[in-house]
Amino acid sequence: MSQTARRNSTAEWQAQDLAHHLHPFTDQHALPSQGVRVIARAEGTHLYDSDGRRLLDAFAGLWCVNLGYGRKELAKVAYDQMIELPYYNTFFKTTTPPAAELSKILSDMTPKGLNRVFYGLSGSDANDTIARMARHYWNLMGKKTKKTIIGRHNGYHGSTMVAASMGGMSYMHAIADLPLPGFTHIQQPYWYGEGGDLTPAEFGRKAAKALEDKILELGPENCAAFVGEPIQGAGGVIIPPDTYWPEIQRICKQYDLLVIADEVICGFGRTGYWFASEYFKIEPDFMTLAKGLTSGYLPLSAVMVGKRVADVIAGDKGGEFNHGYTYSGHPVSCAVAMENIRLMRDEGLVTRVHNETGPYLAKRLNELKDHPLVGEVRSLGFIGAIELVKDKAKRKFFNPIGEVGTICRDHCFANGLVMRATRDTMLLSPPLIWTTADIDEFMELARKSLDQTLADVKKKGWL
Ligand code: PMP
């Protein structure tokens, strides 16, 4: 047990935290009665709380710890870089060796044409950067009315005012009168929840057609870009039908909109591809990267900028790009990102998720379809969802939605499993290092938690 855990002062940490720490995405008022969980250490695929309880992390932290916990190689690189050059900025015509080297690596590994990188610290600030760059691009092109960015309802792109405006979550908009002007949203490609009697293929085309309708409503001359996660993560691991992205791509081309692929979750092997844009054949003008870029060991985000935009903003008309963060291209974060990518490559993790562990996870998840609460399971590589429903035949959700998911999530925790719930959809995003044995452990805990949830639901008379 580590030094921190041995201090055995859970109550003390909880008291300090309750008194002074305002948490993200937490009902702060309800926290004293619910208690805060203290995660004290982690190793490989497991977390340990401050009382030494072991939890299987099926969520890779927050969709980010792709290499798993306790990788000494990453710590060593960070240490060495801190000794050599702990910080220098990349403003005013300056770079550092890690920032320059990582830029080349990212340009080589991302889809064709994405050859320039702008660094930030989070997915949210990266999406803010993209919104500014997109506007800047159209201004430079002399198309000054092309301003509106179109996202999807229930899309998630971050928590800053701009990123939350790009996203389409009503509960995000509610807290600060969002979206800002210049951001609007269309239907999400969520067949299971919204597809009705249409086949997935038909629904995929319908959901894409909503983009064309919106562009025509606003006027193409007013539309700057379309933004989407290849697979919506926080919205419920919504994997669009195969017909969706090709139509989106075609419509953006026809009406001259830039395409923004937010790969903050999907990037770095999560789907069994280095980037989900490869799988869906998206040809983005901007790609947002964060999370798996460093496996979450240090904060870093990267905006990959396509040739079309880069040629203009870095061209003779571009001028000074008055935008940047003190920590843009932080040398320690960049060094850790390079080591993270090297390890993922050397260990063949993406290929393993694609060929072996991803298909094995899908096969085992499918076994849950016999469970009375499970309406659908879906996954691609190591991102997946389990829909808990009232009526499987009619794809009918519980009403109100969200309570059954919370009950299931709490049972998971009590059984030593970390899964997240969005509505009544259980979400899965394990570290890419999971072996078939980890998947078997997961299945055992998940089924037990589902059985306990079913018993509760029956006791309450909801089924
Ligand atoms: N985009 C997507 C698709 C995300 O899932 C997230 C975070 N979950 C973000 C952007 C924002 O990233 P961050 O929390 O690092 O700001």
Image: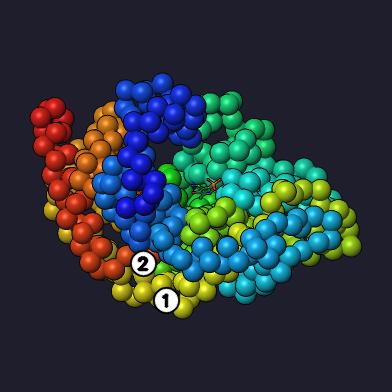
Percent position of residue 307, x then y: 72, 67
- The correct choice, above or below, for 213 with respect to 356 in the image is above
Please give the label number shown on residue 347: 1
Q: In which quadrant will I find the C terminus?
A: top left
Check whether the beta carbons of the residues at disc 1 and disc 2 lie within 8 A of each other.
yes
Q: Quadrant of residue 184?
A: top right
Q: Earlier in the sequence, mark 1 or mark 2?
A: 1
Viewer-closest of 36 and 424: 36
- The correct choice, above or below, for 373 with respect to 95 in the image is above
**Residue positioned 32% across, 49% down in the render:** 48
How far is the residue under mark 1 from the one under mark 2? 9 Å
Q: Which residue is mark 2?
A: 433
Percent position of residue 244, x then y: 46, 57
- The correct choice, above or below, for 168 with respect to 114 in the image is above
Please give the label number shown on residue 419: none
Percent position of residue 124, x then y: 59, 45
Viewer-closest of 32 and 163: 32
Name which residue type carries label 1: Glu
Q: State whether residue 181 appears in this view.
A: yes
Left or right: 183 in relation to 138: left
Tell whether circle 2 marks a residue whose Cβ is less than 8 angstroms from ligand 1: no
